[in-house]
Image (tube, rainbow, N blue to C red):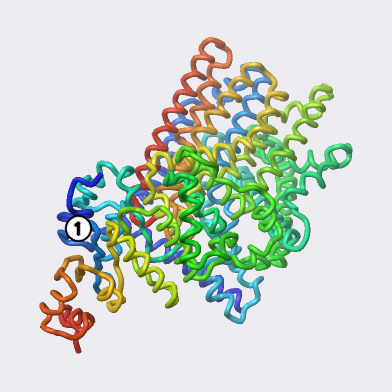
Amino acid sequence: MKIFVLTRLELRLAWNSFKLRLKSRPNILLYVLILILCIVINSTLHMFLNLSPRDVRLQAFSSVGVEEISAYLMIFASLTILLVSSSAKGFYGKLSTLEFRGPDLEILRSAPLEPYQVFIAKSLKVFIKRSLLTFMAELTLLTPIMTFFGMTADRGIVFLSAILLYSCFLYFVEAFTFLASRLTLNLIRGRARTPLVVPLVTFPLFFYEETLNLVNYLVFLPSTAISKIVYFSLFHSVPMSTVTYPMLSFLALFSGLSMLVIVLSALYYEKVETFEELVKADWLKFLKNKLKWSFGSRHSPVITVFLKEFWTNLRASDAPLIVLDYAILLFIYVLNLSGVASDSTGRFPASSLILAFSILLFSFIFQPSVDVFLAERERSWILKVAPVSIQNVVLAKYLYSLILSLMTLLPPFIGIAFLAPFQAERLILSVSSVSLLLVTNATGIYIGAHYTPASLREEFPVTGIFAYMGLISILASPIVLIPLLFLSHPIALVLVLGFALDYAIVLSHHFLEGAAKSFSERDDL
Amino acid sequence: MPSSRYAIEVSGLTKFYGKNQVLWDLNLQVEQGTIFGIVGPNGAGKTTLLKIVAGIIRPSSGGVRIFGHSLSREPENIKSFIGYLPEKPRAYDVLTVKEFLEFIKELYSIPDAVFIERVEEYSKAFGLGGYDQSFMGSLSKGLLQRALLAAIFVREPRIYLLDEPFSGLDPGGIWQFRRTLQEKAKVGATVLMATHILDFVEKLCDRIAIIDQGKILIEGTPQQLREAAGVQSSLEEAYLKLLGEES
């Protein structure tokens, strides 16, 4: 079967690329560090969680009252989602790995193959790669958690499956976005400017209770279900069937939906692949001819490079328009929810924070900073020979990704302002969001400068994604976690938040400097 | 700016890519107003040398001085005097030719009036008149090369660093490019050019260096190279003899 031949080719390419990276000393060091990090995290968790007996620790949770337990748990659950999703961005957010490019166009397109065969082979490779990584992450985290909570093997399996469900949900989100982008490209080729029209078409969804409920379920269901499954498998001695069946249903639901979406995507695959075909698209003509493009006049180099980033990204990918659609739709949605919450009907009270961070999840999936150097591949000479300091180039790219992230963050941010239950938590969430925005973007830029492959044929390496995950998890989590410890001490809380913001600024500056150094010292980019 | 009779001075340049050394203690001086050709077999280090002089990559040791100023100490100041053409022409696919030139104008702070005048002149010279609204990504290799050459010439830099500049150009394009380059050299511009086309090098360059395995084998005028090789016919024959590639 040709699909197997193609899958073998994809896997061989991935394996060879891995072997090639093993020849570079910094990459070997990084792989070793990742391995050590996994062992250290595993052992530390074991040690930390075993310091205090399980009952005492659970008692500490219960002593703060039921309301606060749920708030704590929601925050921790949300934080997990936030961290995982920001980490996952570099991995689950990548749609481009499924596209025809470079040698695919030259070799595979001229071969007697159907486009869907290439698509399925590429999808299989992505699935295998992700499974391996998820397995590694679970191996690191699962045993200490199981030991601490005294989980039996079957509960461990449920917990493990909940993580799998979450991965599945993210894969579904990505596949859906991929399909949406394919459909959009198809539609706009001949007719409407769909990315600009989508918000108007979907607008009525938010004005009818029935459709609004449907949207609510779609947004709430995954994160709430996962949190509840995790919560029950950790803390409650409920019959396994009460946890297992819903979880299996969700797993089946999202696996099925993912498969459906992938199959649908295959139908629209290869509709727009070459640049020549792409420029025939109406929306590009529209952007080229009907909008006034300008790099301005007498700007600073930062603004000039920023404008270049903006215009080229707007034309080169759907991402900015998708983000714009997302921001508009989410804004309307959040406004609707705030109305619901202010009715005090209690329809969404317990999940408000999960909602806020679930929305942040999406914003971090769209987080664009890691990709900023992808556009420079084989073109970086233009900026490197220009009389512009590399620091200014990096700053321009940082500004671009900040603005794009801000667009995605603003609606949930407004949502937080309406829905956060306590003043202190509202303050923490606000300052933390800004700090996280600064840090995650700067980290992404740093990782992008460090790991973006020079060749157009190569994908973003897994080492880079791990490095991003590691840096964000270790360095950004204190921004949210430490202020939480001072919830009941207002003055200390304000001081800690001030420090958190300072820390974020210093850290961002450090990463931007590192990115500039990396970009200027790389011979291949 | 000029504080030296040499536009480009390269001293003790070495470059490693990992463990692979591609330049070995390379020294080179290019006088102002000269068209200097670098020739050599594939993998000799020509592109690496040009990239280092353009400030794209850093040398492992040694240094580059432009008009007597150190490239590593004043990179931004010096880069405004340099026009670089890469071996593999690539630009931002989704910018039109006009927009790309505007971007270059802003990046190099070219005054508007001067820019408009020069764009008109060089677009005409390189046959880009009908392509100003075309995306860079949709241009053929030759047209892209013309667009990038135009982007260099609208800046009128003092130094031209050109890596395989004839690649993809049709005979008309090559003629126009050679003519423009010679005009620039006449008014004091310096050209450092790497190419495999020895015929053009012989006709165009004042001085030539043959580089092999990261070292300069010989440097001089085309006549001096022929004399050193003991041949009187073509530079190609001299080149093959000097490199020991003659069958």
Give the secondary structure at mark 1.
strand
Vertically, is A336 above or below A454? Answer: above
Query: Is the residue marked by circle 1 packed among few (<14), some (14-19), or many (20+) residues within 10 Å?
Result: some
Quadrant position of residue A72: top right
Q: Nearer the viewer, residue A119 or A54?
A: A119
Q: In the image, residue B165 lies at what x, y percent?
A: 37, 68
Residue B213 seen in this snapshot: no
Question: Which residue bears the numbered disc 1?
Answer: B31
Q: In the image, residue B179 lies at what x, y percent?
A: 36, 69
Vertically, is B112 above or below A332? Answer: below
Q: Residue at x 32, y 66 (%)?
A: B182
Q: Chain of mark 1?
A: B
Q: In the image, residue A518 lies at what x, y percent?
A: 36, 46
Q: Nearer the viewer, residue A239 or A486?
A: A486
Q: Residue at x 67, y 55 (%)?
A: A289
Quadrant position of residue A131: bottom right
